[in-house]
Image (spheres, grey):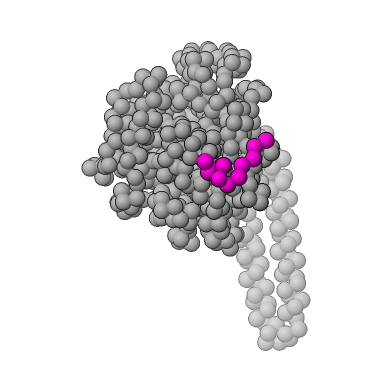
Amino acid sequence: MCKKIEYNETNLFSKISLDYRSENPHFSSLISNFPNLDNFENQIIEKSKNYNNIFRKDLTDVLNEQYKNIELNEAQRNNIDSLKRENSFTITTGHQLNLLTGPLYFIYKIISVINLSESLKKKYDKYDFIPVFWMASEDHDFNEINNFTLSGKTFKWESNQTGMVGDFNLKNINDVLDEFENFIVNTAHGKELGLMVKEAYLNSKNLAEATRVLVNKIFKEFGLIIIDANNSKLKGLFKQSIINELTEGLVKNCSEKSIKKLKTLNYKIQAPPRDINLFYVQKNKRERLIKTGDSYTTENRLKLWTSEQIIKEINENPENFSPNVLMRPLYQEFVLPNLCYIGGPAEIAYWLEIKPVFDNEKITFPLLLSRCSALIISKKTIKKFKKYDLGIEEIFLSEHLLKNKLITKFSKHKLDFSDLKNLLKIQFSKLKDISKNTDKSFIGALSAQEKKQINGLTKLEKRLINSEKRIYSEKISKVMNLLSEVFPDGKFQERHLNFSDFYKDLGQDFIINIKDNLDPLNQKFTIIEI
């Protein structure tokens, strides 16, 4: 069973996310176009004009080098080979290198690019569309990615390493992997999953490589291509934009107009630009770059350059410079023949800030598509919902509204006094008409009395509901406990649980089930029964 509901019925998403999904026209100046199948035709034309096809050889060389120790299937080999041709384009998503992929939506993002690539091929069969996962290997926020939650238990990898997380070695990860393996060993696919995870992390030299191996194992049958852009050859292609950011304040200056518009529309600015949106990378360090007068320095003040010196280093060692969250999209779209970026709510929000940066650098701005979002519910849980006459849409109500709704379902009495209130209003309306024709001074007194009696009925209604709540408290408590199976620890499932929660019981069938039920171009929230 798969059910789709409107996103605004879930009460789980921000205003900017809901407005963008509904294609509010006030975003039109901040994007190239809204994402639908027909709009990809023009996007293909624009990217074909704009993309430097000379990059294709470097791109495929880098990919072949990064995959040299991984066995590719036929679909992946064909996809990498097709990137050499001018009729081939990418559909991309990206994410941090979360331990064991982190929250469930990591999986949904990748399935979104795979399914969109397949849909595009059906409509535009003379082109090839390659699903790409861009690893955020240069990120340095280890505490965001060093844990995952499985069946209410949090597994955490402790390490005192610093710098880009993709470079972290895995020497001290054994304990958390053993703990994980012991936790799942007696499940239907526990041994298979435990082996898959250990092969990825214990046979890899760093976290970036381990993430590639694990994600590849899960998604290789669908032709997914994984790229690590922390690469000197790819950054060499991009070095002029790195220089422009340093010398001209590219991101901050160009994004001012977009940010002003977003503020006027009362949206929170997701990622305010810095004066320089780059980091400098050294061994075990990733330091923000700062301009001081005519010179440049790192935030820790351990490195100092003149303008000539830093430009010289960019030209000679572009791999030493790392884009931040607002500069990375420009880098990605510069090196990839990309048509569409699929991101989560926060990502879409900061992409909306930066189209003028792309315009300045003459890089085609991609179509922005909100990733698929879903809730997975077991058949057993759905059966329990039906037992309590609880509809799927109702589980998204606030606790207060849901409890009141349950009372009206359980109670043998009519608890809604709306009819009585309406009847009262009709009677007072008649009295006011009489007053207008006799003594208008009574109207104020009648209005006050009407308000008093309506308030009295409201209080009685609340007392009756509270009384019924006490009578049915045990039944209500069972329903609320049932909801904890859907919203673990009161949190949105896809932001809390790990894919292993389901993979340990269902294996690869879980991934196939999710893939079969997520349509990235159908902008509705998906509820999947497993």
Question: Image check: 52 left or right of 110?
Answer: left
Residue 529 sits above or below residue 262 on the image: above
Image position, residue 333 (x, y; %): 42, 44
Quadrant placement of the N terminus: top left
Name the image quarter holding residue 497.
top right
In the depicted structure, whether residue 72 falls above or below residue 352: above
x%, y% of residue 394? Answer: 55, 44
Q: Is residue 378 visible?
A: yes
**Which quarter of the rendering shows the C terminus?**
top left
Residue shown at the point (73%, 55%) measured from the top left: 460
Q: Nearer the viewer, residue 119 or 32?
A: 32
- Residue 402: x %, y % from top left: 61, 44
| Magenta-highlighted residues | 302-312
Camera sees residue 476: no
Say left or right for 372 vs 145.
Answer: left
Please count the marks in the image.
0
Residue drawn where x is 55% and y is 51% of the image: 247
Rendered view: 41 above or below 433: above
**Who is closer to the viewer here, 10 or 284?**
284
Q: Position of residue 57 (x, y in %)?
A: 32, 35
User: Is 519 located above or below residue 284 in the figure?
Assistant: below
Residue sitting farthest toward the left: 126
Query: Residue sitting at 53 percent across and 24 percent down?
Result: 207
Residue at 55% in and 26% down:
167
Horizontally, residue 149 falls left or right of residue 508, namely: right
Residue 84 on the magenta segment: no
Tell me if 298 is positioned left or right of 6 in this view: right
